[in-house]
Image: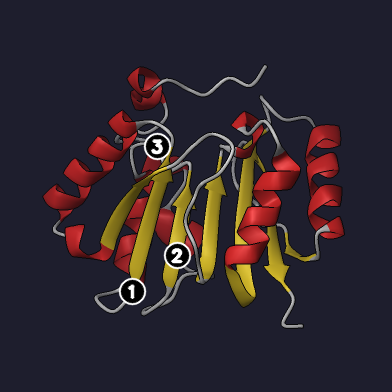
């Protein structure tokens, strides 16, 4: 049984201390550039959305995707407060399909893949919506996802055609950058 973190508990990990542990410029700066179209799938209250919205600039767009409307409401409020609402679109997804088409230059899946019931199907959807050479950053918490579980997910992604292109060092996490080949 897959458990999705309820919106009522988002404050426990998405609060004023989060940027001290996971600095958005350091996390997303190597991947997100001005003018890009990016997606934050499983966006929660918008920690990553906020950081990426700053990085894409006025010409870029961030699509914030979540299965909980309450999370998307938090994102919209946060973007309004930050003056970045024009750079962000919210999208309510289903658990088994995010129902949005690309192309995307970059996708962020931060601390959410362990909540997805069919990881292969999810990764296939991501692969199909990425531009050639587009990348996904997958970050999973060490306290929820074992090395073995992470490796199984990684093997599934490689079978779909993803190339493993990096392993960022992210505190308390297992992380990988996967790229869609230009073929």
Q: Which residue is mark 2?
A: 38
Q: Which residue is mark 1?
A: 60
Badge 2 marks a residue whose secondary structure is strand
Q: Is residue 2 above or below residue 77?
A: above
**In the rendered view of the protein, which quadrant contains the N terminus?**
top right
Q: CA distance from mark 1 to mark 2?
A: 8 Å
Q: Quadrant of residue 131?
A: bottom right
Does residue 100 appear left or right of residue 88 in this picture? right
Instruction: Pick whichever of labels 2 and 3 is earlier in the sequence.
Output: 2
Q: Nearer the viewer, residue 60 or 92?
A: 92
Q: Which residue is mark 3?
A: 44
Does residue 84 appear left or right of residue 67 in this picture? left
Query: Could you tell me if residue 21 is visible in this image?
Result: yes
Q: Residues within 10 Å of mark 3 (few under 14, many from 20)?
A: many
Q: Which label is found at residue 50?
A: none
Q: Are marks 2 and 3 in contact (CB under 8 Å)?
A: no
What residue appears at the point 34 percent right and 68 percent down from the top-left corner?
A: 61
Q: Are marks 1 and 2 in contact (CB under 8 Å)?
A: yes
Q: Position of residue 102 (x, y in %)?
A: 50, 67
Number of numbered markers: 3
Query: Could you tell me if residue 175 is visible in this image?
Result: no
Instruction: Pick whichever of labels 1 and 3 is earlier in the sequence.
Output: 3
Badge 1 marks a residue whose secondary structure is loop
Q: Residues within 10 Å of mark 2 (few under 14, many from 20)?
A: many
Q: CA distance from mark 2 to mark 3?
A: 16 Å
């Amino acid at each position: 049984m897959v458990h999705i973190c309820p919106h009522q508990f988002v404050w426990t990990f998405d609060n004023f201390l989060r940027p001290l542990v996971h600095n958005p410029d350091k996390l997303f700066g190597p991947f997100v550039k001005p003018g890009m179209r990016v997606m934050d799938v499983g966006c929660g209250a918008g920690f990553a959305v906020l950081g990426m919205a700053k990085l894409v600039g006025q010409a870029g767009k961030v699509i914030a995707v979540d299965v909980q409307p309450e999370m998307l409401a938090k994102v919209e409020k946060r973007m309004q407060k930050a003056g970045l609402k024009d750079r962000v679109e919210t999208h309510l997804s289903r658990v088994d399909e995010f129902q949005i088409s690309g192309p995307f230059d970059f996708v962020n899946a931060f601390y959410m893949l362990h909540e997805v019931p069919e990881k292969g199907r999810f990764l296939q959807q991501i692969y199909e919506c990425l531009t050639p050479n587009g990348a996904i950053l997958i970050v999973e918490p060490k306290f929820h996802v074992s090395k073995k579980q992470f490796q199984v997910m990684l093997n599934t992604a490689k079978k779909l055609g993803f190339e493993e292109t990096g392993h960022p060092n992210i505190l308390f996490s297992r992380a990988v950058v996967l790229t869609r080949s230009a073929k």
